[in-house]
Amino acid sequence: MTDVTTTTGLDDLWPLLRRHTQARIGLGRSGPALPTRHRLGLQSAHAAARDAVHSPFEPDTVTAGLPGVPTVRVRSAAGDRLTYLQRPDLGRRLDPVDRARLPAGDWDVVFVVADGLSSRAVHDHAAAVVRATAARLPDWRLAPVVLAEQARVALGDDIAHAMGAALVVVLIGERPGMSAADSLGAYLTYRPVPGVTTDADRNCLSNIRPPRGLAYETAAGKLAGLMGRARELGRTGVELKDESDHGEMTDRIL
């Protein structure tokens, strides 16, 4: 069957609109179904999302992007990928043996690189974000970068608490969608307490994945700015706002 698209007054606008969004818009139809090319594209995106979730974490890929940076490898209490997916609570707790291996100190911040739900995102973007952010923190005491396997965001609470770090930045693979399977998120928390700290106590930067998402330098600038304010105010989360774009937005309005 030949693909047939619906003829509307917007037909000439769809190509222009698609330049500004990754959403699937104006796909048309072939009889009662999607045109074949769009159906195949949807199936391909779904396969990429599944692969992102199930692909194994490769810490060596991250360390290769962090030459000269000390790292520590840990696992969560979820012993394998199936357990991790079925028991989110275990992904928030450190393996007891690995907790004992973490170096304690008077750290200003610890960066945690966690596989999350997309190891692809971590492999592609995490090291660059760590480098760009650390370069903006010349006077900070940086803990060794922790590479965490089968990890949820809250595993960073356990890690920071064990290491004595004032702040934790968790760089984690976000849940893949039908538009992106390589999106990296950054979660910032001040003085986290395992089992007590909630998501309302964190700040998040999402969709770090140039060129279609947030650029590394932009993410690093926002993150370093939030970290500085968090240290001044002694808090993160709903009481800490990212105002890095405020001046630019004001100029646009005026």
Image (tube, rainbow, N blue to C red):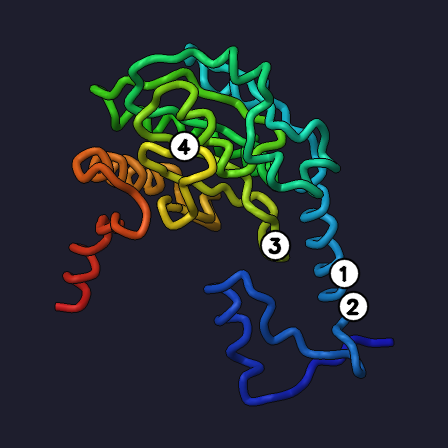
> On screen, 250 above or below 140?
below
Q: Amino acid at mark 3?
A: Gly
Please determine whether, in this image, residue 210 is positioned above or below residue 161. Answer: below
User: Which residue matches tag 4?
Assistant: 129
Marker disc for residue 177: 3
Task: Name the image quarter holding the N terminus.
Answer: bottom right
Q: Is residue 141 left or right of residue 204?
A: left
Choose the circle earlier in sequence order: 1 or 4.
Answer: 1
Give the residue furthest to the left. 254
* Dot label at residue 131: none
Three-letter amino acid code of the residue under disc 4: Val
> Horizontal and vertical percent for residue 197?
40, 41
The residue where tag 1 is placed is 40
**Amino acid type, residue under disc 2 in the picture:** Thr
Residue hosting label 2 = 36
Considering depth in this image, is 145 or 78 the residue closer to the camera?
Answer: 78
- Residue 55 in the image: above or below residue 181: above
- Indicate which disc, 3 or 1, sits on the residue closer to the N terminus: 1
Q: CA distance from mark 2 to mark 4?
A: 38 Å
| SS for callout 2 | helix
